[in-house]
Amino acid sequence: QVQLVESGGGLLQTGGSLRLSCAASGTIFSINAMSWYRQAPGKQRELVATITSGGSANYADSVKGRFTISRNNAKNTVDLQMNSLKPEDTAVYYCNADISVGPAFWAKGYWGQGTQVTVSS
């Protein structure tokens, strides 16, 4: 079984910073892309940032220059450093990882349970 566990959410004021972390555990053979998504109330889940196993990162236009995604392949973790936070960043943030559980298995996406980030104005 594979499990993703996020941590680091919270309540803070506009302009603040927060770091989210996600750790993958269980039967893991390899991890391809790792990503952060978010879902605000009444809105669809959207991709915030993604990073390949080689370290190449891409960001949603709304967070470019403010958020930084990073990963530790040895620890199977992915972090999201969020700076200059705005009220519109308020959402539940989800970790996603494309994981293969064995050499004969295709990779598939796994989700964490989500962590709430609330930015007050």
Image: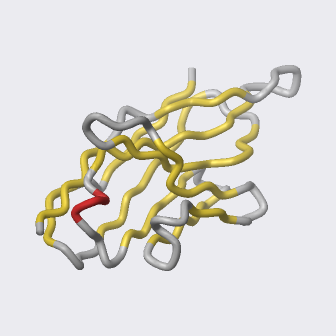
Instruction: From the top left corner, tell me how far across and down residue 10 is, in percent.
Output: 19, 56
For image coordinates 46% across by 65% down, the residue present is: 62
Q: Which quadrant, please, contains the N terminus? A: top right
Position of 90 relative to 114 (above/below): below
Instruction: From the top left corner, tell me how far across and down residue 59 is, in percent.
Output: 58, 63
Q: Which of 41 and 37 is in front in this view?
A: 41
Q: Which quadrant, please, contains the C terminus? A: bottom left
Position of 56 relative to 33 (above/below): below
113 relative position to 17: left or right: right
Position of 100 relative to 76 (above/below): above
For image coordinates 63% across by 30% down, the residue present is: 109
Q: For residue 41, what is the image quadrant? A: top left
Instruction: From the top left corner, tell me how far across and down residue 61 is, in percent.
Output: 54, 66
Instruction: From the top left corner, tell me how far across and down residue 94 is, in percent.
Output: 42, 42
Q: For residue 43, what is the image quadrant? A: top left
Q: Which colour scheme appears in the figure?
A: secondary structure
Q: Nearer the viewer, residue 96 or 100?
A: 96
Q: Which of 77 and 69 is in front in this view?
A: 69
